[in-house]
Amino acid sequence: MKNTKSKKEIGLIVAIALVFSNIIGAGIFVIPSQLAQIAGIGSSILAWILTGLGAIILSFTFANLGSKMPINGGVVEYSRKSLGNFTGFMTAWLYWNGCWIGNATLLIVILKYLNGAFPFMAKNPLIGFLVCSFIIWIFTYINIRGAKSAGAVGTILVLLKLIILILFIIISSKIFNIQNISPIFPTGGGLSSIPMAAAITFWAFEGIESATIASGEIKNPERNVKLSTIIALIVALVFYLSITILSMGAMPRHILANSLDPLSEIMGYVLGSKWIVVINIGIALSICGSSVLWLLSTGRAAYAAGKEKLFPEFFAKLHPKYQTPYISLIIGSILINLLLLLNFFKGLNGAYNFIVLLSTLSYLPVYAVSTIAEIMLVIDFKNKSFRKKILLLIRPSIGFIFCILAIYASGATTVLYGFILIMCGIPVYAYMKKKYNLSN
């Protein structure tokens, strides 16, 4: 009989690295300048606290579901088991598309920092496309070899990211100027800017569900999925707050708002311009850690959907030697390549903005459905009193409301892209339903 089970190769440390790297991604290197464009330090801190609390509430949902249902696919399987095949398909469709589309944004940011180190690359979009293609296929091969290989590479590069961020904290604290953050609530960046700032900061927490996606390959998942999710989120929130505050204190707001790569500029200012090349290469490599681990999530989401016949069955094929979902990984990487090819010639900023819009609303419906799945799980508890069930329902209900508010705050354009993505999935579901006679 053909083996369809994945190997359990991921320990607690690698699981923490997976979640942390997927949360931090590339956003931490650009968000300070994005916040400076619309908000002062006071509104930025409040936005981080508000969205951080929302993310913590959601993290407990993923932690609880992942420990109770330790299966590959995570959010895909939770929604299918709780709400039926159609919801399971849509969750898989949105999440899988969000994963590979989001990975394209990481590659664009990687290239931006490589352009800073090697200016000749910025003059030729074809070179940029070829570099990104080389990176994505190297990481695809690493993932095909197994979660252990991907986790090892990802963990090493996550450590590099931590070193760079800690180095930035030390350097920027030396040139922190209180005048740069005064007043705390400036004109044009006061309390009224909190909703817009929160819309930026919330997207920084995408990836909190990463441990659940690979939970079928995590050792002792009942313990490690929950621990890795919560530890990684808290560490990420501390770094986000620290980097934002120190960036705003180290650089005047009007300069920070116009900076394309604020962290490397601040470190280059202190260390000297000759270090900027080294810093840019280091940042690019550290973001590569997020890319290799997001590929892991991309492959596992499609694998779970294929295994349940929500996606074509070839998505569930495992490599005969490595027992990894190699077809899912290859298809995801081909799509990343095609998207980069279609958009690179708009320029890096044009490509980045387009792809971010395309991926932005993929995750929130998935998060909302996950809170509903936890609500259904609580309702089905047999050994809990009515009062205990009501208390257990409060947190996921707040998480659901938070997701709905975040969808509303994301704006009409983003919602439109999300709606188009959903509509594109309906013909695929209709085909799968007819082929496999899926019931709901």
Image: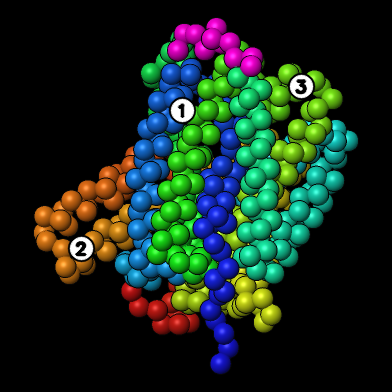
Residue 34 lies, in percent from the top left, at 56, 27
Q: Which residue is mark 1?
A: 197
Assign a secondary structure to mark 3: helix
Q: Mark on residue 271?
A: 3
**Horizontal arrangement in the rendering, residue 424 relative to residue 111 (left or right):** left
Q: Which residue is mark 2?
A: 379
Which class describes the residues within 10 Å of circle 2: few (<14), some (14-19), or many (20+)?
A: some
For the residues labelled 1 and 3, say whether their Cβ atoms are less than 8 Å apart: no
Callout in the foreground (1, 3): 3
- Image quadrant in which the N terminus is located: bottom right
Residue at image coords 56%, 64%: 10
The amino acid beneath tag 3 is Leu
Callout in the foreground (3, 2): 3
Assign a secondary structure to mark 2: helix
The amino acid beneath tag 2 is Ile
Residue at image coords 56%, 28%: 243
Which class describes the residues within 10 Å of circle 3: few (<14), some (14-19), or many (20+)?
A: few
Assign a secondary structure to mark 1: helix
Q: Is residue 368 magenta?
A: no
Most extreme residue toward the bottom is 1
Which residue is at the front of the view, 119 or 425?
119
Q: Is residue 175 magenta?
A: yes
- Image quadrant in which the C terminus is located: bottom left
Residue at image coords 81%, 27%: 275
Of the numbered discs 3 and 2, the one sitting upstream in the chain is 3
- Residue 294, above or below 76: above
Q: Which residues are magenta?
A: 174-184
